[in-house]
Amino acid sequence: MTDREREFASLGIEHAAGIDAASVVIVPTTGREVRKTPSGTWEAQPWCDNYWQEFGDLLDALRFATKPGAKKITVTIDRDGVWAGSGRWTEDCEIVDCAAVLGADQDESDDTYELLCDALSGLPQSEEHWRGPVSVDRPDGLYTATLAD
């Protein structure tokens, strides 16, 4: 086994002859996609779908696509500065496992969750900004969400 094949194996990917010729590789541990661009470079899907990162080598792109999958990202939601609930932030840019009702009824709550998800997924993905906080103003208060790993 070559060093390159060992690297692929350490990322959970069995190296197959011709993998560098593939147009798309799905990372088994995270479900993230790494795809070849028309110019021959590779784009890796980050933990949220808004900014793909480009790499010259498939292995570098796969390393990037596996890193955030190892950590659990928690989202904390406040209403008017008072804790409303906590849940998980998924790789699909959704808030799950949070029982908080964020509005007068289920429809308003669903809308608030969607607005918070949109705001969080739109954050710059630099190290100092991706966590938020973000806020959305709703009829029953100001909701703020913050991410933490």
Image (cartoon, rainbow, N blue to C red):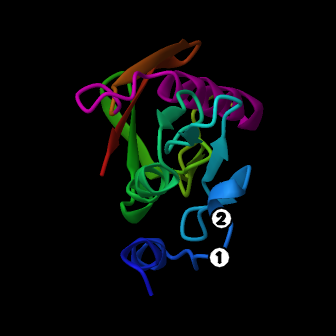
From the image, give the main secondary structure of the stretch colored magenta.
helix
Q: Residue at x 65, y 33 (%)?
A: 109
Residue positioned 47% across, 40% down in the render? 56
The quadrant the N terminus occupies is: bottom left
In magenta segment, residue 112: yes
The answer to whether 134 is drawn above or below residue 45 in the figure is above
139 left or right of 86 in image:
right
Q: Which residues are magenta?
A: 105-130
Q: Amino acid at mark 2?
A: Ile
Q: Residues within 10 Å of mark 1 (few under 14, many from 20)?
A: few
How many marks are shown on the rendered structure?
2
Tag 2 near tag 1, CB within 8 Å: yes
Residue 113 x %, y %: 61, 33
Q: Quadrant of residue 6?
A: bottom left
Residue in the foreground of this view, choosing between 21 and 136: 21
Q: Is residue 64 above or below residue 3?
A: above
Check disc 1 and report the residue beneath it.
16
| Residue 62 sits above or below residue 54 on the image | below
The residue under label 2 is: 19
Helix or strand or loop: what does disc 2 sit on?
helix
Q: Is residue 105 above or below residue 30?
A: above
